Image (cartoon, rainbow, N blue to C red):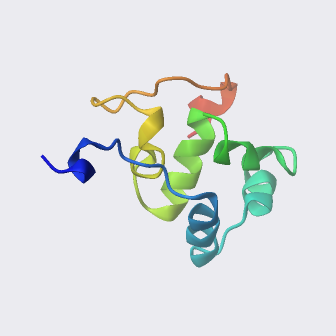
Amino acid sequence: MTANQDEAPRNWHPADIKAALAKAGYSFARIAREYGYAENSPNTVLWRPWSVMELIVAGIVGVKPQNIWPSRYDRQGRHLGTRKDSTLKDL
């Protein structure tokens, strides 16, 4: 095995996440407006686990949340930790 194979997958850089959202015509401010969150709260997902927002962002970008934040998921695709949010049922 090479050193690269031993390394854990890395999360996307926050700038890459913002760029992917922009390419899809979105910003965190637009997500906040459309999904009923406070203006700056969606940005939290860049630094802290939040499964609902991860699903929203990944859906807009067109990938699975595990692709963007592999450190937040186990090998079976289960979220390792999350911010509690009752809006999961709305997705």
Q: Is residue 28 left or right of residue 78?
A: right
What residue sits 50% from the left and 53% below the top? 58
What residue sits 48% from the left and 45% below the top? 69
Check the image and report above or below for 25 versus 81.
below
Depth check: give the residue in front, 33 or 49. Answer: 49
Check the image and report above or below for 70 versus 72.
below
Depth check: give the residue in front, 80 or 13. Answer: 13
Q: Position of residue 87 (x, y in %)?
A: 66, 32
Q: Is residue 42 left or right of residue 11?
A: right
Q: Position of residue 31 (x, y in %)?
A: 72, 56
What residue sits 59% from the left and 25% below the top? 82
Instruction: Name the residue furthest left.
Output: 1
Instruction: Name the residue furthest right.
Output: 39
What residue sits 45% from the left and 46% below the top? 65
Q: Position of residue 8 (x, y in %)?
A: 35, 41
Q: Is residue 33 left or right of residue 62?
A: right
Residue 49 position by quadrant: top right
Depth check: give the residue in front, 25 or 16. Answer: 16
Count up the numbered dots.
0
- Rendered-image quadrant of the C terminus: top right
Q: Is residue 30 left or right of residue 5?
A: right
Q: Position of residue 41 (x, y in %)?
A: 80, 44
